[in-house]
Amino acid sequence: MSALTDLHREIDARVDTIRGSHPDWLCGKGCDGCCRQLAELPRLTLSEWALLQTGLAALDETQRDDIRQRLAVLGPAPARPVTCPLLDPATGACPVYAHRPVACRTYGFYAERDRLLVCPQIAAQEADGKHATVIWGNHARIDRALAETGEVRSLAEWFNQAEWKAEAGCG
Ligand code: SF4
Ligand code: SF4
């Protein structure tokens, strides 16, 4: 099992525990708020990119071309907030959900030092005391483990590699 798979399992366990104790947790299918409010283009390690390529390769050519075009429109350093170029803007769905980066898996369920990594809706619930019993995941630990899974580049940098585009028949 790869280090990234181990990490996914650890995150899934934390998410399942929180969901299990809070069945009305806001994160769920159809909520794309955080995908439309990124601070920057997604950044992925080499292992995350290898996984994401599998998801991208399974898309049809039109979907990949749409992603390529959205990346081109955004450019290398888009202004905040950034809508993830992988998001299908028509449906609000993530077309690479099973292959998405770690940051997408932890958001809404983890904390970094004294800061929750959550959207304003969950932050408001926290402020109201609704999540007093939640044991938030420790993102510092995730970051340390993720750092072992290869160099980090932005999605645009990975996506624009000639070898990948040739393999996937993209652009
Ligand atoms: S973190 Fe907030 S915006 Fe993102 S999926 Fe969860 S509820 Fe929706
Ligand atoms: S990769 Fe998927 S889940 Fe992550 S921000 Fe982009 S659209 Fe959202």
Image: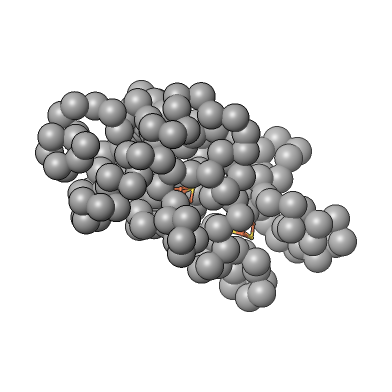
The residue at the far right in this view is 128
Q: Residue at x 56, y 39 (%)?
A: 82
Pick the front one: 2 or 128 = 128
Q: What colouring does the structure picture have?
A: one colour
Percent x, y of residue 107: 58, 49
Seen from the viewer's position, the closer of residues 17 and 24 is 24
Residue at 61% x, 55% y: name it.
Answer: 33
Q: Quadrant of residue 37?
A: top right
Q: Quadrant of residue 65?
A: top left
As drawn, 6 above or below 69:
below
* Residue 137 relative to residue 45: left or right: right
- State which quarter of the image contains the C terminus: top left
- Residue 55 appears anywhere in the view: no
How far from the left and from the top, in percent, is residue 166?
Answer: 13, 34
Labels in figure, total:
0
The answer to whether residue 19 of the structure is visible from this angle is yes
Q: Residue at x 49, y 51 (%)?
A: 105
Q: Is residue 45 shown above or below 99?
A: above
The answer to whether 122 appears left or right of 38 in the picture is: right
Query: Which of the two residues, 159 or 20, is positioned nearer the viewer here?
Result: 159
Please provide percent x and percent y for residue 64: 27, 47
Which one is nearer the viewer's eye here, 26 or 32?
32
Q: Residue 29, how many percent across, how many down?
A: 51, 68
Q: Is residue 77 above or below residue 25?
A: above
Which quadrant would residue 18 be assigned to in this image?
bottom right
